[in-house]
Image (cartoon, helix red, strand yellow):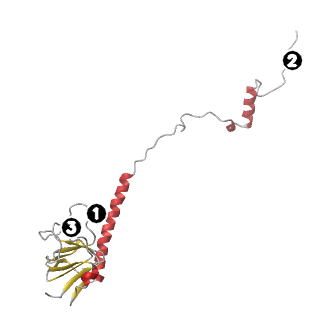
């Protein structure tokens, strides 16, 4: 078998079925050779090998008919065909909680890249950054819409003491002269006192 391996490390490999997640995968001649930890899969290289740092990207199997969809009914296992897709993020996140066609950075069939590319890290990282930015903006927009729906409408109501009727004049609002007259009338006297003539006698 050829030693020209393609080795992907530093990501999340979802084999499917009951198999646990891994971080690396390797194939050659269109056949998967290993799925496991970065260290274990790197150790398989015996000659010219192409190493690709996934930088957090996710590897999933293509579906049984070779198409890209999630969830997939196929599995990735040693000895099987290298039919897989590389995604910018994990399709099991809340944003992909339903059957959908995820956006792939690359699609591999029989060990050959048929869509996208497996470029060096310097090229792969901007691609992943773009997909992550789109994902984050989408999640922020969803959270913002959720907050707006939770805000209850404003309800206005009048206070019981809010100008129900005109209030009477306050004493402080009267002038000094008017207050003096008012006090005089209250004492039963003329507000403009003057000497009264004595009663006449007959």
Determine which residue is flagged by label 2: 198
Image height of 89 relative to 179, above or below: below
Would residue 8 appear left or right of 185 to someone viewing this image? left
Locate residue 88, reporting x and y percent. Answer: 27, 72
Q: Nearer the viewer, mark 3 or mark 2?
A: 3
Secondary structure found at label 2: loop
Q: Nearer the viewer, mark 2 or mark 1?
A: 1
Secondary structure found at label 3: loop
Would residue 14 appear left or right of 169 to someone viewing this image? left
Residue 83 seen: yes
Estimate how packed mark 3 is, as few (under 14), some (14 to 19) or many (20 or more) residues with alpha carbons within 10 Å.
Answer: few
Image height of 135 relative to 35, above or below: above
Estimate how packed mark 2 is, as few (under 14), some (14 to 19) or many (20 or more) residues with alpha carbons within 10 Å.
Answer: few
Residue 174: assigned label: none
Q: CA distance from mark 1 to mark 3?
A: 23 Å
Locate residue 186, reporting x and y percent. Answer: 73, 26
Q: Nearer the viewer, mark 1 or mark 3?
A: 3
Estimate how packed mark 1 is, as few (under 14), some (14 to 19) or many (20 or more) residues with alpha carbons within 10 Å.
Answer: few
Would residue 11 appear left or right of 78 to someone viewing this image? right
Q: Residue at x 24, y 80 (%)?
A: 8
Image-quadrant location for residue 14: bottom left
């Amino acid at each position: 078998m050829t030693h020209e391996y393609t080795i992907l490390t530093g990501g999340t490999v979802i084999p499917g079925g009951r198999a646990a997640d891994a971080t690396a995968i390797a194939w050659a001649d269109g056949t998967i050779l290993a799925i496991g930890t970065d260290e274990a899969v790197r150790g398989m290289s015996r000659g010219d090998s192409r190493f690709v740092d996934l930088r957090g990207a996710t590897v999933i199997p293509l579906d049984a008919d070779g198409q890209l969809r999630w969830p997939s009914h196929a599995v990735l296992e040693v000895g099987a065909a290298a039919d897989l897709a590389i995604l910018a993020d994990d399709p099991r996140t809340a944003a992909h909680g339903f059957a959908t066609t995820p956006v792939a950075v690359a699609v591999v069939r029989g060990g050959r890249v048929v869509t996208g590319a497996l470029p060096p890290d310097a090229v792969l990282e901007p691609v992943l950054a773009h997909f992550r930015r789109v994902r984050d903006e989408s999640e922020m927009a969803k959270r913002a819409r959720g907050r707006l729906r939770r805000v209850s409408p404003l309800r206005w109501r009048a206070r019981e003491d809010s100008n129900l009727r005109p209030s009477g004049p306050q004493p402080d609002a009267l002038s000094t002269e008017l207050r003096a007259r008012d006090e005089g009338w209250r004492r039963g006297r003329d507000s403009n006192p003057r000497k009264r003539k004595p009663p006449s006698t007959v």
